[in-house]
Image: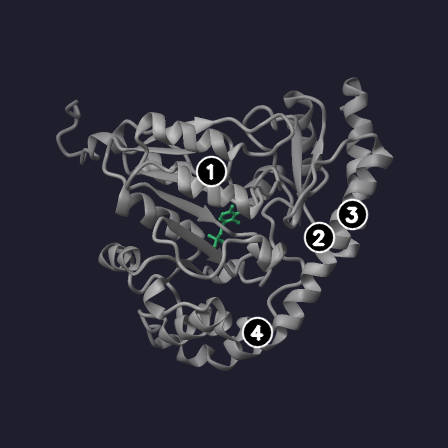
Amino acid sequence: MRSLDPTLPLPAPAIAALPLSTPFVAPEELARRAGHAELLRLGANESPFGPPPRAIEAMRAELDRTSWYGDPESMELRVALAARHACGVENITVASGIDDLLGLCVRGYLAPGDVTVATLGSYPTYVYHVAGFGARLEGVPYERDGSIALERLAERARATGARLVYLANPDNPSGSFAPRAAVEALVEALPEGAALVLDEAYADFVEPCELLPAPIDPRVIRLRTFSKAYGLAGARIGYCLAAPSVVQTFQKIRHHYGVNRTAQIGALAALGERRFVEDAIAEIVRGREDYRVLGERLGLATLPSRTNFVCFDLGSRARAEAMVEELLRLGVFVRKPGAAPLDGHIRVAVGSASERGRFALAFAAALQTLEKPELA
Ligand SMILES: *Cc1c(COP(=O)(O)O)cnc(C)c1O
């Protein structure tokens, strides 16, 4: 299609055909729209405990050198990560979060028109990159209980000749977790030449023995982040564990200065703060139980979760949407799963004890408002 105005640049056809979309409307934008200066942020699965204090100190001590670029190879951090994961630095790419790495997976391994399989309604940024790079998504719905049937992902991958399968494990937004044996079986069942993009954003919340073992399987690209358990979401830093050939492929296309120096320093320092991170995780586990009990008290079922958030069942998509709106009106930011059968739930991050208390009050009030729509 030619533009009528010859001065207007034409986007590439695949891009021109895309709807205007972002994977998420940010809480800052939602606050502006709702007229709130600040929201109780329970919608982005951020850590209520912040980064480890020693990581803050380390970053602060180096702020004067923000005039320097960071090391584009993130070598110090990769050496520490290699020791942590019993692999080599050649198995690790550091990037500005898993979101960045998802783009590298798609761009590196899916030519326009190539097929990838993912759970319908799982973490949307993967799908966003798939659309943006012109690949084709084959979606497999969640099971009714919010779990993911890994054998169905494998079946669909074999039926469609998919080159990548995406699995978030533990999953967002369901919070469900597939055991290690099921993940291993999925890898074995992949079509020839295909890889599993294993998004392990919440791996810190499960026991290491429940995850794939340390040796790098060349068919798996594992993605990790400092955004969740380590409390560094705003620093934008994550990494992949993968075969050297994958790391080399990413090396050709990645944004070499896309990881900022302060984030490298913060991540390296945070890695050494196991005690702080373990305490934060233990408090998240307590908070999940608080939410389950809260749901029970309010007559709402919750989905079991192995992450730092819990889904509450509002019974229908319309009610869940109304709840997100009403909570926003009360100054509380939460999200909801977009696709059936989970679209009748809202997803609430585990906050600090005081944030959980504030959420419980707002949630109870919002439920009352929903029950009397004529007053809303
Ligand atoms: C939060 C989240 C991410 C984002 O990770 P970043 O490292 O902050 O980009 C990726 N995947 C899943 C499943 C998440 O929940």
Q: Mark 4 = which residue? A: 56
Left or right for 195, reference 123: left
Query: Which structural element holds mark 3?
Result: helix
Q: Amino acid at mark 3?
A: Glu
Q: Amino acid at mark 4?
A: Ile
Kindly report the distance in space between the C-alpha atoms of the residues bearing marks 3 and 4.
Answer: 29 Å
Label 1–label 3 contact, CB within 8 A = no
Query: Residues under labels 2 and 4: Cα distance?
Result: 20 Å
Instruction: Nearest to the eye among marks 2 and 3: give it.
Output: 3
Q: Which residue is mark 3?
A: 289
**Residue 344: x percent and y percent?**
65, 26
Q: Is mark 1 within 8 Å of ligand 1?
A: no
Label 2 sits on residue:
351
Q: Is residue 92 visible?
A: yes
- Per the model, the C-alpha gap separating discs 2 and 3 is 12 Å
Disc number for residue 124: 1
Percent across and percent down for residue 337 are: 58, 33
Q: Are marks 1 and 4 in contact (CB under 8 Å)?
A: no
